[in-house]
Image (tube, grey):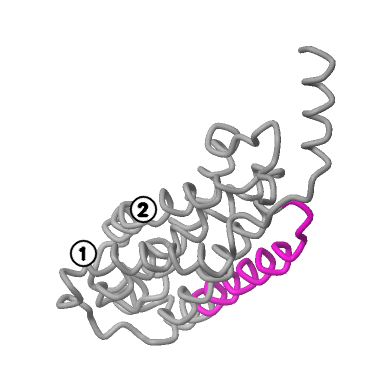
Amino acid sequence: MKQDELIETLVDDLRRVQNRPRTGRSLATFLLWSAGSALVFTRGGTSISDAPGGAALSLFVILMTAAAAAIVSSIPGRQAWRVGGVLSLVLLLVWGGGAAIRAVSVWHVPFALWGPVPWTKCLIFTLAFAVVPTLALIRIVNRGWVVQAGMTAVLTFTAGAAAGALTISLECPSHAPLHLLLGHMLPIVCAALIGLLFARLLFVRPLVPPLAT
């Protein structure tokens, strides 16, 4: 590299980093992809069951907080993603803890414990329904400048899997606690681990961050 090119590169590195992607717009885009995926997999909403509103609300808040944290984590200098990450983890633990408590109370009643639907079916479908939202969020986050690829990947895959779990929860008629833990919550944990495993392949930080115009 010539000396003048090196100087220009150093000057570029000192410019103010633009906040890309914009959090609100990017989050709205992710929600649109998630909603579109849910409509397709629930056949336009016609197969939505009478799933408890509390579970659906919890999953929606989890996917919102995790997605927002993933997007913010791709903006250099921003630390607010830590709050969203911790909040999504706490909500996931509270949701799972509630199901675990209910499982203990019906431990000796197999049908009430497991429900009428095989949990393996919901686990597979939750992961399948998570593919589109996760890919959409990966594309959104990669428009930024990912510094901590591992944490960003965990948040991204958690949000995508929560969107998949929300979709299957709208379809699934089972409210049994162990079914929810293994069929609906376990896929989110598995997806987060998969994201962590492939983080450096999915989120490659460019040499120079996006520049303000």
The residue labelled by disc 1 is 40
- Residue depicted at x 57% and y 64%: 66
Q: Which mark is residue 76?
A: none
> If you read the primary sequence from the N terminus, does the residue marked by circle 1 or circle 2 appear first?
1
Q: Considering the whole magenta stretch, tell me its main secondary structure.
A: helix
Question: x%, y% of residue 199?
Answer: 58, 39
- Badge 1 crowding class, 10 Å Cα cut-off, few under 14, some 14 to 19, many 20 or more, is few
The residue lying at 26 percent from left, 72 percent from top is: 172
Residue 98 at x, y percent in the picture: 53, 80
Between 37 and 6, the residue placed more toward the observer is 6
Q: Amino acid at mark 1?
A: Val
Residue at coordinates 73% horizontally, 63% vertically from top-left? 82
Foreground residue, 170 or 114? 170
Q: Give the quarter of the figure containing the N terminus.
A: top right
User: Magenta segment: does it hold 143?
Assistant: no
Left or right? Give the position of 86 relative to 184: right
Residue 170 screen position, x and y as percent: 29, 75
Q: Is residue 78 left or right of residue 189?
A: right
- Residue 176: name its quadrant: bottom left
Relative to 124, 64 lies left or right:
right
> Which of the pair 185/39 is nearer the observer?
39
In the image, residue 10 lies at what x, y percent? 83, 31
Give the residue furthest to the top.
2
- Marks 1 and 2, how far apart at CA: 15 Å
Question: Residue 127 — which label?
Answer: 2
Q: Amino acid at mark 2?
A: Leu
Q: Which residues are magenta?
A: 76-100
Give the camera-side residue of 84 and 102: 84
Q: Does the image show residue 132?
A: yes
In what element is the residue under mark 2?
A: helix
